[in-house]
Every structure is written in structure tokens, then in C-alpha cells.
Image: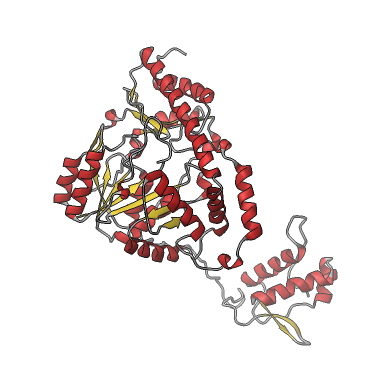
């Protein structure tokens, strides 16, 4: 007697796997009781119209998995060690019902915008990937693969490959006057933010942030147990007086800043305010996280040096990324800080992964060493400057025809912060239906702040328009459609 009724299906799965699966399910269902002797492979093969070797492969797989036992000169038996009994022995099979799970900090499944689905893309930090020199970068990667030291492929170098660290240090000194003895290479700036949060934040600690800010940063802080304190900001950036008041009221451990191009408003924090903020944090024992996410793209003047370049007390943690220079998929970010901080960050990073993407890091290092990195950066800075001028011209045109929008042309960055003069709640969803991606003011507040400064719905009037990721003709067409959605009475 053969154990089950089986007929091979014509699909991509190997037949021996199909037979093994059918036998496995029969054992689970109690149709084959523990200790049951199966027919021999010689007997099953013609019954199932299979090759005997196919049957043998299926039986041996189940032996390897522990479902069957092979006894010499006796055949194959359902193993006695399975916690499964037949329905003949028990009137009712146990019915397994998924139990309620208790998570430490329940979070929603992440929803990431599939930007490729939009015809017009005004994402604020999106580089023009079509302009990236993939052919020359491929040469760097190919050269690395041909000459890589096999020792580098083993575990180790948690803080990043020395070749890339050296190139980044040279670049930071020449481009930002930032001298650092060491740094840590991360998988993008988000990992850098999360690692910094893990190192400093204990549940209940206070973290101060600009009222309008980068949502993933505040989520990282909150996930580590932080209590977020909103700080007022004005047309010049973070308000120093309000920061001092909150430092007196709360024991603030970290201050998160985007001083060069404030996210999302693009405002550059003045040298005076930077110095005042630094002095206050030193006085009250706070540490500053300086997120310099797009330092490279500054057009009308030389960018201000990072706060980390003048940090005698060692209280600034400097974070940046190559995602805006290259593309997000490259996953290259870095952290500069004092020695004791980097030691802790490396230790926490090792808990996440034991090794970095060696080939990518070495390829980026070689790309930088050859000078191609700098040439690409100069090309893209020139291109993005022209696109920023084009967007400013388009917005000025809409002002002239009577639309109540206002904007300040920023010194740099990859986006503009536009006051539409009307409520823009719901514009994002409406624009999405017309193939347009943008961000609106309400996205940049944090609803769970301990001290929330989020305004009423009627005060949501700003949109953030990225200009770097699409050509000027495409941008112009998208803006025209967007204006018609925001201002329905505007003539097409």
C-alpha cells in the first residue's frame, strides 16, 4: 500500500521536491502515523509514474529534514520523535491560533513613496541619477574587484575601510575646513542618526529639534526612548532665546540641527546664531548633532563652514552623506566626532552588522582618489545652480500673474520652500493623483513632541519643491499643472 495519492504538477518546482512536500504534509496532518513504514522506492516509482531515483531523492530529503528514519534492510519509517499523532489516536487535532504578540515599541509598516511612478517629481533631496557617471564608476569598481586584498573581505573594520576614510578626511579638510583624526563610515546618514541616538539616549531623555524638521531623524530619536522638545524657528532659523528657555526648563541631552540648509525651509543659520547655540549647549551640557546633508550644493556664495570645524569642547557630532552626490542606493554616510563618541558608535554598529560593504567603499575611495569625484561634483553643482535659477524664474512668473505665493531664493540646497498663501492640506494627495510628487508643510511636524508647536490646519500654507532631480522643461510643465491644482481659478 502506498502512503499517499500523488500526481506530479507541471511547474517550476522539481518533482522530487513536490513528492517530498506531499509526504511531509501527510505526516503533519496525521495521515502517516509516527512509526509507519513506507512502501519501498521500487514500489512507489511505478505507482506514481516516477523514476526510482526521483523517489529516492524525495525520501532522502525527508530523512535529512528529520521527518523519516532510514533503517538498513528494513526501509523508511515516519520518525518516532515528531510531536504529531494521528487522528486515530486523538479525536481532535490541536488547532494552532496565532497568539497576540507584544512588541517593545509597536511601529507601522514603513511606507516609502515609489518616486518612479510620478511623472513630475519635486522630491527635495533627489539627485539627477541619469547624470551620474556610471561608466567611470564601473571602472573603479572593476579595478577594485580585480585587485582587492582578500583579507579585507573577512570580518573587521567595523568603522569603515581605511582607504575611504582617508579620502573623506582629505575631502572634508579641503572642502569644509573640517579636520578630523578619525571617522566612522555608515550605511547612509539615517544609520548614523540611529547609532548616535542609541549611544546617547536613555528612555525619557530630552532631545531638542527645530519645530519643522526631518521626520526620520525624530523617529530615530523617539524609537530610542527620547522625548522630543520643539524649538521655535523664524525666517533666520532656530530661535536662540527659545532654546535657552527650554534648556533651563528641561535637561536636554541632544540638539539636532540642519544649520547650512535647514530642513525643510532651506534657511542658512547665521554665524552669530551658531556661536550662541554652541555656547548655550556647552553651558547646559548638551551635545549638538549637525546634519550637513547637502553641503556640496551651495551656489551664490561659499558655504559656511560646519559648526564641527570650530568645536573646541568636542560637543558636535557631524553627520553627512554621499546620497545627494551619488544616489541613495550607494549607502555611504559618515560620522565625525571626538574619539570617545566614535568608540561607542563603532561598538553599537557592530551589534547591527559585523562588516561593511567593502567593494562599494573601496570603489568610492578609488573614484575619489582619481579626481573623478570632484569633477562630477563640479558638474552637478553647475547643473543644479541652473535648475535653481530656472525654478526661481518660474515662481517669479507666477507671482507676476497674480498668484499669492512667496519664496526666498536660497543660497544653496536642492529645494525651495514656497508659501502658497492658501491652505495646502490635501494638495499632496490631489497632486499624486495627477502624477505629481511634492511635500507639504504638515509633513515636517512631529505629532508626538512633548512640546508641540504645530499650528492650526489653516496655517499650513507651505510646500517644498525640489529642483535637482528633473530637467527644467519637465519641471516647468509639472509646476504649471501644480499651480492649477493649488489655485483652481488660475487660467491654464
As rendered, which of 262 and 425 lies closer to the eye?
A: 262
Q: Residue 301, percent across and down? A: 37, 32
Vertical position of residue 106 compared to residue 96: above or below: above
* Left or right of 236 on screen, residue 380: right
Q: Residue 306, percent across and down? A: 33, 45
Vertical position of residue 260 compared to residue 336: above or below: above
Q: Quadrant of residue 23?
A: bottom right
Residue name at image x 60 percent, y 46 percent: 137
Residue name at image x 19 percent, y 49 percent: 279
As rendered, which of 75 and 287 lies closer to the eye?
A: 287
Q: Quadrant of residue 145?
A: bottom right
Q: Residue 384, percent across and down? A: 47, 31
Q: Residue 435, percent across and down? A: 51, 29
Residue name at image x 48 percent, y 51 percent: 332
* Left or right of 115 on screen, residue 348: left
Residue 126 visible somewhere in the drawing: yes
Vertical position of residue 270 compared to residue 35: above or below: above
Residue 161 visible somewhere in the drawing: no
* Left or right of 255 on screen, residue 360: right
* Left or right of 320 on screen, residue 63: right
As rendered, which of 107 and 219 lies closer to the eye?
A: 219
Q: Quadrant of the N terminus?
A: bottom right
Amino acid at each position: 500500500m502506498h502512503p499517499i495519492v500523488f500526481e506530479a504538477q507541471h511547474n517550476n518546482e522539481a518533482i522530487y521536491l513536490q513528492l517530498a512536500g506531499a509526504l511531509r504534509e501527510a505526516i503533519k496532518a496525521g495521515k502517516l502515523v509516527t512509526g509507519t513504514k513506507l512502501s519501498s522506492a521500487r514500489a512507489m516509482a511505478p505507482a506514481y509514474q516516477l523514476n526510482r531515483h526521483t523517489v529516492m531523492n524525495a525520501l532522502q530529503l525527508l530523512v535529512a529534514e528529520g521527518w523519516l528514519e532510514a533503517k538498513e534492510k528494513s526501509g523508511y519509517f515516519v520518525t518516532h520523535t515528531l510531536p504529531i499523532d494521528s487522528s486515530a489516536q486523538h479525536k481532535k487535532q490541536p488547532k494552532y491560533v496565532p497568539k497576540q504578540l507584544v512588541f517593545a515599541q509597536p511601529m507601522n509598516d514603513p511606507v516609502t513613496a515609489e518616486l518612479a511612478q510620478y511623472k513630475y517629481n519635486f522630491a527635495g533631496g533627489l539627485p539627477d541619477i541619469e547624470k551620474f557617471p556610471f561608466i567611470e564608476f564601473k571602472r573603479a569598481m572593476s579595478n577594485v574587484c580585480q585587485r582587492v586584498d582578500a583579507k579585507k573581505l573577512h570580518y573587521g573594520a567595523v568603522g569603515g575601510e581605511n582607504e575611504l576614510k582617508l579620502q573623506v578626511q582629505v575631502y572634508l579638510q579641503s572642502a569644509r575646513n573640517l579636520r578630523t583624526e578619525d571617522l566612522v563610515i555608515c550605511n547612509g546618514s539615517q544609520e548614523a542618526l540611529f547609532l548616535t541616538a542609541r549611544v546617547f539616549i536613555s528612555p525619557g531623555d530630552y532631545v531638542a529639534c527645530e519645530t519643522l524638521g526631518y521626520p526620520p531623524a525624530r523617529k530615530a530619536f523617539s524609537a530610542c526612548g527620547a522625548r522630543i522638545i520643539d524649538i521655535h524657528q523664524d525666517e533666520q532659523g532656530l530661535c536662540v532665546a527659545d532654546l535657552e528657555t527650554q534648556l533651563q526648563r528641561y535637561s536636554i541631552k541632544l540638539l539636532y540641527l540642519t544649520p547650512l540648509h535647514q530642513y525643510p525651509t532651506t534657511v542658512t543659520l547665521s554665524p552669530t546664531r551658531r556661536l550662541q547655540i554652541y555656547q548655550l549647549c556647552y553651558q547646559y551640557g548638551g551635545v549638538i548633532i549637525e546634519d550637513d546633508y547637502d553641503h556640496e550644493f551651495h551656489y551664490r556664495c561659499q558655504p559656511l563652514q560646519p559648526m564641527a570645524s570650530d568645536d573646541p569642547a568636542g560637543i558636535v557630532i557631524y553627520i553627512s552623506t554621499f546620497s545627494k552626490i551619488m544616489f541613495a542606493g550607494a549607502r555611504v554616510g559618515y560620522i565625525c566626532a571626538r574619539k570617545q563618541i566614535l568608540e561607542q558608535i563603532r561598538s553599537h554598529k557592530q551589534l547591527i552588522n559585523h562588516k561593511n560593504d567593502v567593494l562599494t567603499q573601496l570603489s568610492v575611495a578609488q573614484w575619489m582618489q582619481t579626481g573623478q569625484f570632484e569633477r562630477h561634483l563640479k558638474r552637478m553643482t553647475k547643473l543644479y545652480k541652473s535648475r535653481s535659477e530656472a525654478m526661481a524664474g518660474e515662481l517669479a512668473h507666477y507671482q507676476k500673474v497674480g498668484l499669492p505665493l512667496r519664496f526666498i531664493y536660497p543660497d544653496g540646497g536642492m529645494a525651495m520652500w514656497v508659501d502658497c498663501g492658501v491652505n495646502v492640506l490635501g494638495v499632496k494627495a490631489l497632486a499624486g493623483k495627477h502624477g505629481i510628487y511634492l511635500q507639504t508643510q504638515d509633513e515636517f511636524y512631529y505629532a508626538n513632541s512633548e512640546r508641540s508647536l504645530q499650528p492650526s490646519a489653516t496655517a499650513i500654507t507651505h510646500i517644498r519643491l525640489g529642483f535637482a532631480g528633473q530637467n527644467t522643461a519637465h519641471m516647468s510643465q509639472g509646476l504649471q499643472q501644480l499651480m492649477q491644482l493649488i489655485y483652481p481659478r488660475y487660467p491654464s
